[in-house]
Each structure stands twice: as structure tokens, then as C-alpha cells.
Amino acid sequence: MQRFTLAAAALAVTFSSSGFAAGSNFYASISAGDADNDMGMGTSADFIVDDSDLAYGLSVGYRINRYFAIEAGYQDLGESSVIGIGAGGAGPGGAGGPGNAFGDTIRMQGDASLYTDTSGFTLGAAASYPVNNQLDVYAKAGVFVWDTDYDYDGGVTINGVDYSGTGSVSDDGSDFYYGLGGRWNVNERVGVGFEWVHYEAHTDVDVIGGSMLVNF
């Protein structure tokens, strides 16, 4: 959160200076919203599940023309967790058996806990349509190169591999993202918007939130 706040402040200071002049095809944007992690697991009284967190992102883009652009950026999807509350040998999908969480079959012993944090880089394209002089609607899609860190405490089994004590493991890969949104152009330099973006990573994550775009 602190990194996002600093980035937003830096953009605001940089592009509010009187010497700034819009006119090139480049732009930068920042975004923040609620990330909902689809952990694919049932409900169990033996576990406390937290599958939402703050997500934020930074990106730069280049407009090929009025309607199409290419974009690259960084996206942090926040943290999710499953915390056992004393059920011996139960799975997150229900007491007494393994459950599906974080994209893997997981078995947690006793009061074990498991946290996951996913972030990565995006590369894709955006298509926009001007409804009028101030309002644009847009769609975007591309590749999401992600990395997921797992922090565990206690006995945890992930895909048949046993982990105990306290430690961390990680996984990475590349999948897709896509989304829709609308943007209100405050002036020629700045636009503010609202968007939904779906990220496919170790699990599927949906982010709904706001954004700010600044034209160079």
C-alpha cells in the first residue's frame, strides 16, 4: 500500500507541473481495487478463509491510434490465507478430507496456516471507444507473467509434498488477463476510471476498482 501511495504522489507531482505538455502517444496509469481470489474451496468450520485484499498496479502504454494501444505494467494482487483452528488432518474443502485451495490440493494439520501473495508483469493491448468528448469505454487483454509466494506455519501438504514448521515456497508461470472499464477524461492530461480485470494465475483473481491515467 505504501508503494502505491508513493507512486500516486509521484505521478500527481510530476504531471501537475506547469511545464508539462500533453501531446505524445505515451501514457502512464495507476490502479487500485479489491482483489477477490477464487480459491475454489468449500466452506468448513475448521478453517478461517480470507480471500480478498487490496490490489494495485502501475502501467505504461503507447497509443497506436485513437482506438488501439499496447501496454506493459506491474500488478500486485494482494494476499489470501487459510488458517486452521484446531481440526486435525482436515482439508479446507471440509473436515476429514483434502480441499482445493490456491489452485492446489491442500491438507492442513491442526492449527496450521497458509498465506499466498501473487504479483507479476503484464503485456497486452487495449481497445477504446469514445462515447463522447469526455467518456471512453475500453477493453484490454494480454499475458500475465506471475509469481506466487506461499508462507506456511505448521503441517501443510501441497500436491502430495509435505511441509512442516515455518517456511516459504514459490511457484510461477504465465497466463492471461482481460478486463473492461470506463474512463472520464477530466482534461487532455488526466482521466479517471472504473474497471474490472480478471487475472489467471495460480488461481483466478478478479479485481474491481479505480484508475487514473496521465497522458505524456
Image: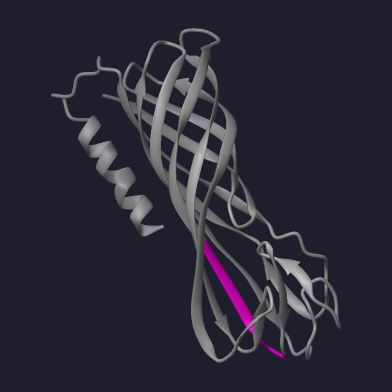
Residue 167, above or below 42: below
Identify whether 101 is placed above or below 111: above
The quadrant of the image that shows the C terminus is: top left
Seen from the viewer's position, the closer of residues 199 and 175 is 175
Main SS type for the magenta part? Answer: strand
Which of the 4 quarters of the picture holds residue 191?
Answer: top left
Which colour style is shown?
one colour
Q: Which residues are magenta?
A: 110-117
Is 33 contained in the magenta span? no
Q: Is residue 44 above or below residue 182?
A: below
Q: Which residue does the image show at 78% across and 71% down from the upper left?
A: 99
Which corner quadrant of the image does residue 138 belong to? Answer: top right
Instruction: Measuring from the top left, give residue 92's x and y in whole percent.
Output: 77, 74
Residue 51 lies, in percent from the top left, at 66, 62
Location of the N terminus (image quadrant): bottom left
Q: Nearer the viewer, residue 27 or 34?
A: 27
**Horizontal placement of 215 versus 50: left or right?**
left
| Residue at 41% across, 26% down | 70
Q: State left or right for residue 16 relative to residue 131.
A: left
Tell me the residue at 61%/76% (across/down): 114
Residue 57 at x, y percent in the picture? 43, 45
